[in-house]
Image (cartoon, grey):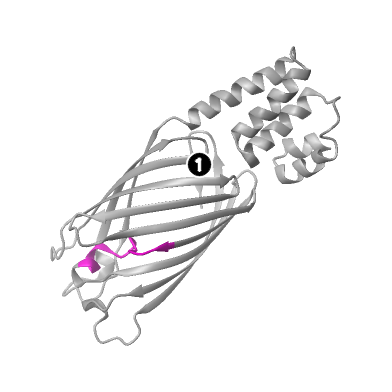
Amino acid sequence: YTVYTAWSGRCDQALKLYEKISQNSNQEAFLITAIADCVSEQQGLSQGITMLEKWEKLYPQDKDIDKSIKDKRDELQMHLRPYIDFSASSNNSAVPNQPGVSGSDIVEYTYSIRYTHPISEPLSAYARYITISSDDPNNTTEDLNRIGVGVSYAVNPQLTFIEDYAQDNDGDNGGSTTTVKYNPHSQWELSLEYASYSEDVPLLALPQDTKTDRTSFTWFYHTPNYQFEWLNSISKYNFEKGDLLAGQEDNRRTEIASELSYALELSEKREQRI
């Protein structure tokens, strides 16, 4: 039953079941490799390799254990290679006080690139660059360019700390972001984040001296195969008294969001969601 639980992706339960028989020296290779996969997922690839190497000493001729060790070493080497991510997105900006223009008529375009350099399995550093532009017909603002650097450290597979610092091209706007991520279960992720300078203020609001910090709490759930996903977040903003909020007594805002997603197609190269 333990191996079937591991094969089905229920690694939390499989590892608990395996604790009862872990000291038994007479174990089949298919059980050892299945549990090693779960150990790698839950505790990191290094721990999975260590477990397999222990059993390799007892079964030096076993091809399945030997192959699993080689595969995990290759995966670890891939994990430690630097990589680059690129993303592009657009959204409508609903910013008031734009004479003759409806907020829904203005589209902002965001392009970002990020270079990540793993230092070890739990530790990585990164640098990122973001450029944001809009089709604002009034040309009230120039394109924004933002540069950021950060470091991510996983204390264990359940707990990760991320520290980021970013600066805009005007030299006046920038700040740090501290993020703590916790996975109480393989299908759940909780995240607490504080940004001294929130980067989700629309570009068109910046000329009106609209700045804010942000405190966010996010929780994310997915089924074992990621076919169903559920993301929830609550964010609190504390705006400075810029032109956009002139005359308003309360400069605090709260945003609550929820998103459900179902994958119609999941493959190595493509996925379609609603």
Q: Residue at x 74, y 12 (%)?
A: 61
Residue in the picture at 85% in, 40% down: 20
Q: Residue at x 77, y 40 (%)?
A: 5
Point out the stretch of residues depicted in magenta. 194-206
Q: Which residue extends farthest top?
A: 61
Look at the numbered disc 1 and give the secondary structure of its residue.
strand
The vertical placement of 234 against 39, above or below, is below
Mark 1, other Cα within 10 Å: few <14 / some 14–19 / many ≥20? few
Q: Is residue 250 magenta?
A: no
| Amino acid bearing label 1 | Glu
Number of marks in the rendered image: 1
Q: Is residue 243 above or below residue 247?
A: above
Q: Which residue appears at 49% of the width and 28% of the height?
A: 78
Front residue of 4 and 159 = 159
- Residue under numbered circle 1: 271
Which quadrant of the figure has residue 184? Answer: bottom right
Task: Between residue 122 and residue 98, name the one nearer to us.
Answer: 122
* Image quadrant containing the N terminus: top right
Q: Is residue 258 visible?
A: no
Whether 200 is among the magenta residues is: yes
**Which one is nearer the viewer's eye here, 216 or 138?**
216
In-front residue for pair 85/151: 151
From what the image shows, is residue 94 above or below residue 2? below
Residue 238, x across and y down, in percent:
36, 74
Instruction: Tell me where residue 57 sits by quadrant.
Output: top right
Residue 20 left/right relative to 190: right
Give percent across and percent down for residue 247.
Answer: 25, 87
The image position of residue 198, as x and y in percent, is 34, 63
The answer to whether residue 92 is visible is yes
- Residue 271 pos. (x, y %): 50, 41
